[in-house]
Image (cartoon, rainbow, N blue to C red):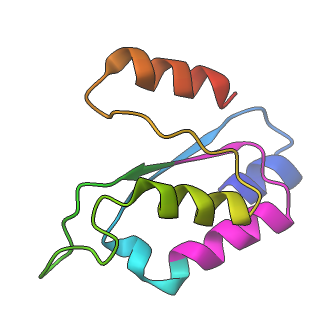
Amino acid sequence: MAYTGKNFDKSSYRVYCLLGDGECSEGSVWEAMAFASYYQLDNMVAIMDVNRLGQSEAAPLKHDMETYRKRCEAFGWNTYVVDGHSVEELCKAFWQAQ
């Protein structure tokens, strides 16, 4: 959607993608982040919910926010780590992501 919006629709809409830390154990998430970085999809915002819960057991990185941050930044993403229970922090991060 972000690729189409930027390259075909030439539209200003943004695409928001909600990710769980359990699914971030899979390669497809990191492939998508690499794709978005390669094609400079600056119209895409990924929101990662790190709650330590995988489908059948705890997510491998548990609450290791520093590792998640470093991985996202390695793909060229601007990364903001916030307390998901703080509306103020969330709003600030969404504003900065524009």
Residue 83 visible, this orientation: yes
Instruction: Specify whether residue 98 is painted magenta.
Output: no
Rendered view: 93 above or below 59 = above
Q: Quadrant of residue 42?
A: top right
Residue 8 visible, this orientation: no
- The number of callouts visible is 0
Rendered residue at 42%/34% (across/down): 82
Rendered residue at 73%/65% (across/down): 75
Work out whether residue 81 or residue 22 is closer to the camera in this orientation and state it. 81
Rendered residue at 60%/66% (across/down): 71
Write down the region rendered in magenta.
29-46
Position in image of residue 16 (x %, y %): 53, 44
Rendered view: 28 above or below 96 = below
Check the picture and name the quadrant holding the N terminus: bottom right
Work out whether residue 9 or residue 89 is closer to the camera in this orientation and state it. 89
Position in image of residue 21 (x %, y %): 34, 65
Q: Is residue 11 left or right of residue 15?
A: right
Q: Quadrant of residue 78?
A: top right
Return the residue found at the far left: 56
Rendered view: 35 above or below 90 = below
Position in image of residue 17 (x %, y %): 50, 52
Q: Is residue 43 left or right of residue 55?
A: right
Work out whether residue 63 or residue 89 is closer to the camera in this orientation and state it. 63
